[in-house]
Amino acid sequence: MHTLKQEWFGNVRADILAGIVVGLALIPEALAFAFIMGVDPRVALYASFTMAVVSAFVGGRTGLISAATGAMALVLVSLMANHGLQYVLAATILTGIIQLILGGLGVANLMRFIPNSVMLGFVNALGIMIFITQMPYLLGSTSMTYVFAIATLILVYAIPRFFTAIPAPLIAIVVMTSIALLSGVKLQTIGDLGTMPNSLPTFFFPDIPLNFETLKIIFPYALALSIVGLLESLLTSQVLDDMTDTSSNKNKEARGQGIANFVTGFFGGMAGCALIGQSIINVKSGGRGRLSTFTAGAFLMFLIIVLGDIVIKIPMPVLVGVMIMVSATTFNWGSFKFLKQAPKSESLVMLLTVAIILYTHNLAIGVVVGVILSALFFVAKISRVTVVDELGVYSVKGPLFFASTTKFIKSFDDVTENAIVINFENSQLWDESAVGAIFKVKQKLEQKGVKVHIQGLNSSSNQLYQKLI
């Protein structure tokens, strides 16, 4: 009970102010994602509202911001184009169910298999992607667009040196928007991106036939959304763990993402997950508790319904300045040192993870490929087995498993003794392939009249050997 109270009311002023900043930052992102999918802006805005509010109560990582995201929007593009919004909402509900099941099965435990090099690649790719997504609002624009973006960036970095009671991004947004309105300068605004809704989302069931054909259509999308959403959310949760030097319950976060998506589908929103940019804005603005996440979602609705006429006048260059700060903060500048000091294989994995994410615009693909490459490099590294002949005693050094059996077998091609000993004191048998390789060597040599004696197997290796021969 004390922990719950601390999570909600242990940082009230900072959480509310941080939530307000995030609420403002969610609007242009949601509108952009709605444009990607080709849906009414309400679909993304409602999703951001419900995802943030629900996950504030049921998530496992305090301060994490969940909302509509570009990664999820990209998965849903073809479903929206081919079958329409009602199927998108049904897929969102099914996504929630799948994520809830995966969270219950402990899917977050798989996080330990993601190497540091892949995590670095993930974080750096996100930093670069956040920066790149802001460029359309700057490139080809007027000189005043650049002036306002740079001035916002200067304020965001300068204000904390003199004043920290209110988050610098919030002060920068208010100051620069006021200057724009008072000066009458012509700039692209939030209102230019799309129409704001004027009512709260309402509960309804998606208008689709409840049969196996519908399931066949939405299940592949829901499965993809579940994996992408959980991967992005759990990695974002880990990033916040590192930034705040705190721990989080990632299986609870996985279940929380599922509940939030399940609810979102019934309120007309698209599937969502954690937003790393907005999560970092929240933490950098002082947000630490569940109240910051709740405030972000609630204030988002307050902004677009009550203050919509004011919000649409906020210049995009101002928000771009804030997001450039986020991209610079997200990027791990220590990576250049990592590239110099780390083994070449790990540096290559990091660079390839970044490249794949940037090329595909899909975080999940980049991370999965990065993990696979790391595993392959690891297997290649540990599969170096050597066999040394010392007067008929063949000492095996290194682990014997499927990747090292070929070299092990070839080491006995030129045996000339009548009897040999194969010593495994400095080796370990890991799988059936290892036992099969020993059996193959024995069979081949015994056919030539060579007696083979196996010795030095440790208890686990001997147990596997006796079980399989």
Image (cartoon, helix red, strand yellow):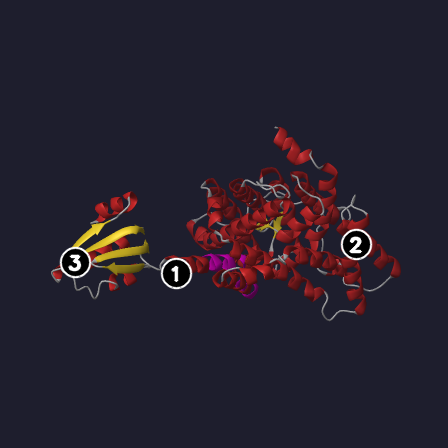
Visible in this render: residue 37? no
Q: Nearer the viewer, residue 466 or 180?
A: 466
Q: Which residue is mark 1?
A: 380
Camera-side residue: 293 or 234?
234
The residue carrying mark 2 is: 158
Residue 333 vs residue 288, the one in the foreground: 333
Q: Is residue 413 left or right of residue 153?
A: left
The kind of residue tagged 2 is Ala
- Residue stretch in magenta: 356-371
Q: Residue 361 magenta-drawn?
A: yes
Q: Position of residue 402 (x, y in %)?
A: 31, 57
Q: Which dot marks residue 443?
A: 3
Magenta run includes residue 428: no
Q: Which mark is residue 103?
A: none
Q: Earlier in the sequence, mark 3 or mark 1?
A: 1
| Alpha-carbon span between mark 3 and mark 2 | 76 Å
Amino acid residing under circle 3 = Gln
Q: Which numbered disc flags the more N-terminal residue, 1 or 2?
A: 2
